[in-house]
Amino acid sequence: MSQVVAEEDQVSVILDNEEISDALSGSNQIVSASNSFAHFLANGFSKLDQSCLESCIIQTSVSHNLRMVTSCTRVVAIHRNLNTSRSWQVRAHGFRLSMKAVADKCGGDANVRYAWYGAPRDEIFEIVTHGFSWSMKAHSISLSPAKHLLDSVLSSTADESGLRHLLLCRVILGKQVVVTGESSNQFHPSSLEFDSGVDSISDPTKYMVWNSRLNFSVVPCYIVSFEAPYLSGLREAKTIQPRSSWMTFPTLISILSRFLDQSRMASLKKHYSDFQGKRITRPQMIERLKQIAGIQLLTALLKMYTDKVKFWTL
């Protein structure tokens, strides 16, 4: 299993504009893990020294992606997949064969990327033990591109220790097709021409891999365990429902107060006061919201409501 990443890219792989050098794999320091990570260790994952370059790049990526949601995110541990069992060797071999087949079909480029997968800890355990299973998802799984971590984070849940767990995977994307809500329940691509689904070709925030090619197209490479206490505010936000098909500024500000710090909330309330006093326009107020709360957080909030809910009204 340890050969999977190295064989994909001989020199390095890219994670959110950062490099993880596979040549460093021999110098990673493995440290003792607490009992809370015993399941990962028992299934061939080894804890990385947090000071090694590989670990630092992943930590930076997580912190960078979540900085507009909470400044209290703390990566507790990163485990790398070094499983050499027979079953994982079969999966790794299948991944390499699939990558070659897709590359041959797509003119030499299999379009292999890093992507995040978030889930409750028990599901992470199942994947670590048995790999991705058809029985886990009815039709497909959804992963997040490296720079759009938040969606996968919201799919995770805190365990009894307050930790959330993400899988950082290598994914064979091949040729992608835009998947709409109407086609999201299909079991396979609409045509053999395509290998994976995406919500946008130009700037994807979601990758879809169908069950028909799941286990040989997605390989978990790392488990990232982290604390993000203020993310619970996103779940609490669901208790605030718009009274009509419009979400007002006061409703949004009330939701944002559950996880933005005092400084950003004070700035947001000042801009809203300026908006009420007609000292700034609605487009200017919207821009202030984007700057203070961040596009990722605002997008995540909007996804909690139905498509009929509209946004940024009085």
Image (spheres, rainbow, N blue to C red):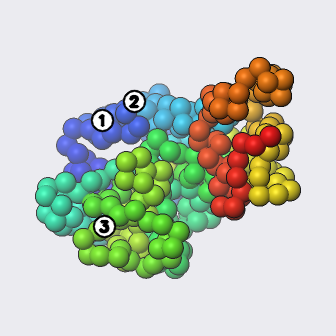
Q: Which residue is mark 1?
A: 21
Q: Is residue 210 left or right of residue 194?
A: right
Q: Which residue is mark 3?
A: 195
| Residue at image coords 37%, 32% | 18
Q: Are marks 1 and 3 in contact (CB under 8 Å)?
A: no
Q: Are marks 1 and 2 in contact (CB under 8 Å)?
A: yes
| Residue at image coords 79%, 44% | 248
**Residue 22 position within the rendered picture, expressed as x and y whole percent measured from the top left:** 28, 40
Image quarter of residue 157: bottom right
Query: Against 22, is 88 above or below?
Result: below
Identify the mark nearer the N-term, 3 or 2.
Answer: 2
**Residue 247 position within the rendered picture, expressed as x and y whole percent measured from the top left:** 77, 49
Identify the mark nearer the N-term, 1 or 3.
Answer: 1
Q: For the residues marked 1 and 2, what is the alpha-carbon distance in whole angstroms?
A: 8 Å
**Residue 25 position within the rendered picture, expressed as x and y whole percent measured from the top left:** 32, 39
Q: Camera-side residue: 78 or 234?
A: 234
| Residue at image coords 65%, 43% | 298
Query: Against 102, is 6 above or below?
Result: above
